[in-house]
Amino acid sequence: MESINENRVVIIVGDTGSGKTTQVPQFLYEAGYAQDGKLIGITEPRRVAAISMSNRVGSEMNLSSSVVSYQIRYEGNTSSETKIKFMTDGVLFKEVQQDFLLTKYSVIILDEAHERTVYTDILIGLLSRIVPIREKKGNPLKLVIMSATLRLEDFTGNPNLFKITPPIVKVDSRQYPVTIHFNKHTPVEDYLGEVYKKTCKIHTQLPEGGILIFVTSQQEVHTLCNRLRQRFPFHSNLTDTATASSQTKHSKKSSRKRKQEKEKVQLPDIKLDNYSIYPENKNIELADDDDDVDLSDGFEDKDDIELEKQFGNGPMEPLYVLPLYSLLPGDKQAKVFQPPPPNCRLCVVATNVAETSLTIPNVKYVVDCGKVKTKYCDKVTGASTFKVTWTSKASASQRAGRAGRVGPGHCYRLYSSAVYNDFEEFSLPEILRRPIDDIVLQMRFLGIDKVINFPFPTSPDKKQLLAAEKLLVSLGALNKADIPKSFKESKNVVTTLTNIGQSMATLPVSPRYAKMLVLAHQHGLMPYAIAMVAALSVQELFLPIKKTPQDRSGKRTNQDFAATARALWSGSGHSLLLGDPMLLLKGVGACEFDGNVDQFCDKFCIRTKGMKEVRKLRLQLTNTINLAVPGINLCIDPKMEPPTESHAKLLRQIVLAGLGDHVARRIDILPGDCTEEKKKQLKYAYETLETSDPVWIHPDSVLYKKRPKYVAYQHIHETSKPFMKVVAGIEPEWFPLILPNMCTFSKPEEEPAPRYDSQKGKVLCHMGGTFGPQSWPFTPTEMEYPSGIDCCRWFARFLLEGLVCPKLKKFVPVLSEPPCIMIKFWSKLKPQTEVLLKPLLAANITTKKSLLKQWTKDDTFLLFEYSRWLPEEHHPELKKQWPPV
């Protein structure tokens, strides 16, 4: 611990279970770092970890929650008495935006740095610069980076990060030993069945102690929980012996029935560390959680028969089975930290959310399937896919360490040591696995102009950076002229935020949704846009509806209510074409009107935790916009009227503005030599802007059967096919008006001829062209005449005709030449045309607004040039009323 006192930056690496997260804050607190109003800040990569570690440290230090507090998004218990503050890394990043030097902190501890989330990497880079600045100002800040399994070369071998290599403190001893057990052989497909059998054997053969099981997804958690509850039923009212006896008899009866239906099979003598021989498989891809797949098919009956033959079907000690995953409501997550009921063994089935910084009491056995479900995003297109692959050695070590937190434990790894040796040492950092447009925008807002030179622990790919900047340009957040044409030029380019970009950066949502909110304010649709954006920002809000037959009583199920409600919410016309965003918007509005979130969500198959997050985000966005826009006075109206047809049309355009690079066109015309099989494969398919590979609308979308010609989608998710999710219908004529940065325009059309719009004060013309890199054509659309000499010629003509300044109309009959000669190809032959054109072109005067601005600087501007078009007898009158405004 002395190294922490002696150095400004320290890296602490210790085995899982060594107690770093509790001992280091306690040492710093006792050393006086939390005095004079300063805080000790500790970041955790997950919300549940921040809450649980706050409670644990406060308990071990015998301090109240007002002293050892936590702050996560939408929730926290910090106060003026707080000395030690646990938070997610995203919360600390937001604080950096408000106070770059983090002046209220004396120590920042980045815990679980090996997780390598995007915000953790950004914070490490920022703090590597903040620490020396604070040192020079005489207000030192201490940085402690902690991890059980950290790739040290990313920190110690990176001179751009730390000029002076920080000392590494190694904590080699665990609090309690953990015995690792490998399988002799590795299962291929049925690893979930092997997890089930291993858990049953632990429960029936080994001494007391909690069991923690690691699987890959929410669906696997529920499948395994249900199976274990059926095998070892727990009755909340154990005194109700009649109920317990009845369920035991039913279990025995079902078991006998399964035995009669199955053929007699000879089973080998299976030990805890012995499974049947399977070849290894390093990459098994499963369907997404939304897909209707029963993972228990094929192993339930066979496994139960095998286990019953080994251990009999007598009464067993109940198993108190609890799920744990990130989307689980907070109150249900908290159950895993509470003691199990008497005479029950605790069994927690978790995803990798339980891998770090969580101490579940009494866990003695860990069952590790060795798999992890990871989201991979294309660095350029953003198309995502979930793959179940082998985890890394670092993550496997973290999982094993969960068994050594409160006593000696055992970790049963359901793979062989030979397979383990082929694992990657560390998981890939998140910054290399997803688009980073939101991070680039936030860094621009912090004044970091050259992101490519930022001291990342692991630098993102140049393609990621360029894709992020292109997206921000298309959203209007960055100036188009600043984007480099090649990767080599990118080091010498300094990009700048536009006014819209600065507004977007202040909003706590992704740049796409921030652009929607900025545009919504211009059209008076802010309440609808806030509700829609909040719903779009929360993943998996609506649960998939599965068609189930009604029971004999004819009573309607929640699935029926949900299906009927969604059909009504989708509406018709523009409301229907708004698609899934309209469904989300009306679902949020209906829930707010109902008031009872839990009951409403249960009835209409909506994820309760997600809807509560939507409400919190709506409140946060409403407060942020009220502070940013004086006099707007927004509030969350529980009786907000549904959007009208005109509102729905504008909301469709707003969705297009935010998702401009996520546009797809239906494939209608196929090549003549295309085979029938190929045509069948491409039925109902779409093509996107970035790739020629076909995509399809997801079956859960309200536009699945409507299939508009053009759609905008939130993201592409690849399962059995690449599916577009959260889809809205759009119109191609909106491309040049809403997304001009993504269009290539032809020359202005001669017919209809350009005209002057007196309300806008601009010259308008019709222009056609193509949209996006695939060059999709769009019909000619009326829009502002592109700036240049031709636009100046047309503006000069309309000025002479008295359309720009009506006071000049009385001089039109006495003009020496008709105004139309300004646009003739032979106009140079007339000296007065060139005399009038030159000052307009030099000052780039193509609108009435720019002309009036010039007159405020020089009230004689154009007086001489215009007088050349009039006889001398009219010059005194012209001079008297100049400028003609």
Image (cartoon, rainbow, N blue to C red):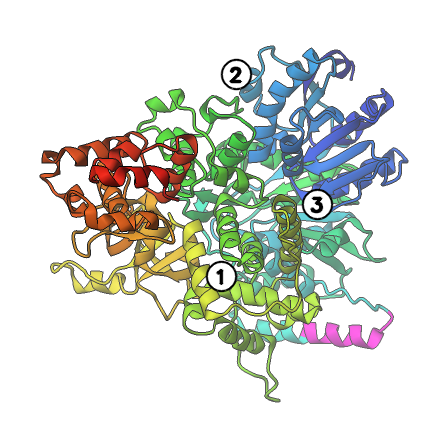
Direction from residue 817 to residue 700 in the image, left or right: right
Q: Amino acid at mark 3?
A: Val
Asked whether residue 305 appears in the rendered view, the answer is yes
Asked whether disc 1 touches disc 2, contact meaning CB atoms under 8 Å apart, the reply is: no
Number of the front mark, 3 or 1 = 1
Give the image location of residue 453, x and y in percent.
Answer: 47, 21
Q: Amino acid at mark 1?
A: Pro
Q: CA distance from mark 1 to mark 2?
A: 44 Å
Identify the residue under disc 2. Answer: 160
The span picked out in magenta is 239-252
Give the image location of residue 741, x and y in percent.
Answer: 34, 43
Identify the residue under disc 1. Answer: 581
663 drawn magenta: no
For residue 299, what is the image quadrant? bottom right
Q: Pick the quarter of the image with the C terminus.
A: top left
Q: Which residue is the extreme one toward the front?
A: 873
